[in-house]
Amino acid sequence: MSEKVVGLGAGGHAKVILDVLGLDDRFEIVGMLDTNPELHGKSFLGVPVLGSDELLHDLYEGGIKYFFLGLGSTGDNEPRRKLFEKASGLGMEPVSTIHISAVISPSAHIGGGAQILANAIVNPSTILGINNIINTGAIVEHDCILGDHVHIATGARLASSVKVGSLAHIGVGATVRQLIYIGEGATVGAGAVVVKDVPAGHTVIGNPAKKLEK
């Protein structure tokens, strides 16, 4: 019997996750929740949008024990963290979403609620925290350690033994040299080439990557 799952956030990222879960007969997507009232009562890729996040408690009490995040991020991962913790705090369990084309080493540790998308690679002895996105075509090399609620965006590449703090975002097509530390909540801009550590909360851009001055 398939497990019933609700999706949180009905935007572009959710479309990708629904595609992946549609290939997995272990789950039945019963609906989506979204804060936009204009979506309520409508269909999202064939899945009904039931209402806002305020329905989570009632859904859990009604027997829906699993959730996935359809909410993506483009630099600020705090909204994903809050939504993840809201659902988890009720006792719901996050569904890990792993595309059949992803390559994951048996020695890698994958935290709960991971979203590892098409053609992504997670190599040996890597550790992923909870609620990580390893987006389409991203590469996480051996011995990397990622904190919680991290997003490695499409086509980004982490060389070996990179450490990424919680809530950090590595932008589209960025490259991070081996042994680099990316601090908590830091952002690496799209296409950046990181050859020095990035302090917590900083944003870096360019080749070589330098701090973005506000």
Image (cartoon, rainbow, N blue to C red):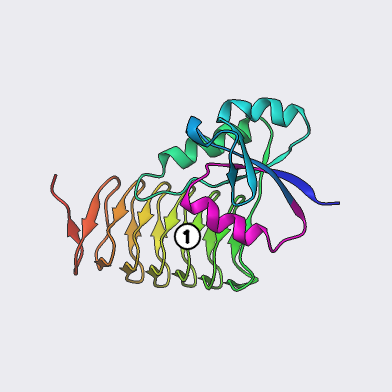
Taking the spot 56% from the left edge, 33% from the top edge, the residue there is 40
Q: Is residue 26 magenta?
A: yes
Residue that numbered label 1 is attached to: 145
Residue 206 at x, y percent in the picture: 19, 65
Q: How many numbered marks does the figure carry?
A: 1
In the image, what residue occupies the spot 56% across and 32% down? 86
Furthest residue toward left: 213
> Residue 105 versus residue 82: which sits nearer the camera?
82
Q: Report if residue 39 lies within the magenta region.
A: no
Residue 153 percent location from the top left of the image: 41, 61
**Rendered image quadrant of residue 201:** top left
Q: Is residue 191 left or right of residue 145?
A: left
The magenta segment is 6-27
* Residue positioned 53% across, 65% down in the render: 126
Of 13 and 49, the residue lying toward us: 49
Q: Nearer the viewer, residue 72 or 51?
A: 51
Element at label 1: strand
Residue 118 appears at what percent x and percent y?
54, 69
